[in-house]
Image (tube, coloured by chain):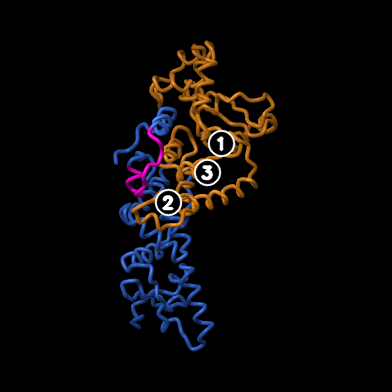
Chain colours: A blue, B orange
Amino acid sequence: MSNTSENPNPSSSSAKITLKTSDNELFEVEEAVAMKFCTVKQYFEDEKDNDVAARGSSTVIPLPNVHSAVLARLISYCKKLPQSNAVADNHEEEETKKKERKQYGTPGDLVDLISAANYLDFKEGLEFFNQALADHIQNKSVEYVRKFFGIKGDFEPHEEEKYREEYAWAFEGVDED
Amino acid sequence: MSFRSIVRDVRDGLGSLSRRSFEVRLPGHHRGKSHGSVHELHDQPLVVQNSRWASLPPELLRDVIKRLEASESTWPARKHVVACAAVCRSWREMCKEIVRNPEFSGKITFPVSLKQPGHRDGPIQCFIKRDKSNLTYHLFLCLSPGQIFWAPNSLYMIHSHPITMLSCLRLAEAEGSTRKKFLRRSPLAATTLPRSRMSSMC
């Protein structure tokens, strides 16, 4: 648990914080990484205030809403945080970013990643995965989007038909599901 | 059927979505409104059912749709956000809030925006510019009439993603025979829309 000798860069960031996931897995992460998660940061600071003797390495922070598989991915994303989440100016750059966003799991995983990033108040991660989700539903059929989100279309059949007729151009040339 | 009556039909048929998008909304008001809408989403009967997405706060979904909307500034790629409005009622409400009218966003979502009659000195005007080198046409939106005279270059800044005229010209096709001739002579063979669809829109 306290094996920190592997860290090749024993700087101030080498302080470790232990996070405990919903499935009782323990993650020992660098303080700099853990502080990206505002929920953890808050907890950590509160702990510090409450207990003067508490040191980062000895505090286990419980994360009952996050599964280990999801946390592992968030941490790996955190470690190689892209410079910017802003929409790229040129097309090629945007394509590269899109590919990068796809690497972090299948679209079905996004719900867990987004919900964990939201719970952890991890702003960059939330932006990144929300963008990945936007990429995913872009140019998909309405039926696919409904299925993906588990949404039931609640328009009257004639309403829906009318809309599709009026904005026929919006429903053409969508990607295959 | 006269052109005028067709236009009227189209406009009447557009429903609230496009009408909302043409409303003049002040940025300050917009903020207030969007807050209200998030609230409304809570109040509405739960649309997202039997899905893990249902547990996520609606603000997150809103952010996703905003990103989708922001990712494409040119028409017809902005169809994504229009298609999203067809998913369900709460999504439609959300999309209506997110898609802002051209005066503020500088983006044309509905091609019919080009056909909206406006005053000569209205807050939004459009200009057509021909690029001789590659025979393409660009439509520029001028958000403030003064700017085009004072600083022509600022057009590019105001609207850094010119809308290609391929579709716009076709939209304007029914407006007059001059345009028709112009279109026939112009080498704009490619278009993003099939002709049959266009006739229903013009």
Question: What residue lies at 50% left-to-right and 15% top-to-bottom?
Answer: B174
Q: Which residue is mark 3?
A: B98
Provide the residue span drawn in magenta.
A144-157
Callout 3: few (<14), some (14-19), or many (20+) C-alpha neighbours within 10 Å? Answer: many
Would you place residue B182 above or below residue A42 in this image?
Answer: above
- Give amino acid for label 2: Leu
Horizontal and vertical percent for residue A169?
41, 29
Secondary element type, mark 1: helix
Residue at which label 1 appears: B20
Would you say the residues marked 1 and 2 are in contact, meaning their CB atoms lie under 8 Å apart? no
What's the residue type where badge 3 is placed? Ile
Most extreme residue toward the bottom is: A53
**Label 2 belongs to which residue?**
B46
Is A94 on the left or on the right of B31, as rendered?
left
Mark toward the viewer: 3 or 2: 2
Which three-letter amino acid code belongs to the residue tagged 1? Arg
Closest to the observer: A63 or B39? B39
Chain of the residue under label 1: B
Q: Bin the neighbour count of mark 1 within 10 Å (Cα to Cα): few under 14, some 14-19, many 20 and up.
A: some
Tell me how far mark 3 sits from mark 1, CA to CA: 11 Å
B28, above or below B174, in the image = below
* Residue in the foreground of this view, choosing between A14 and B184: B184
Label 3 or label 2, whichever comes before in sequence order: 2
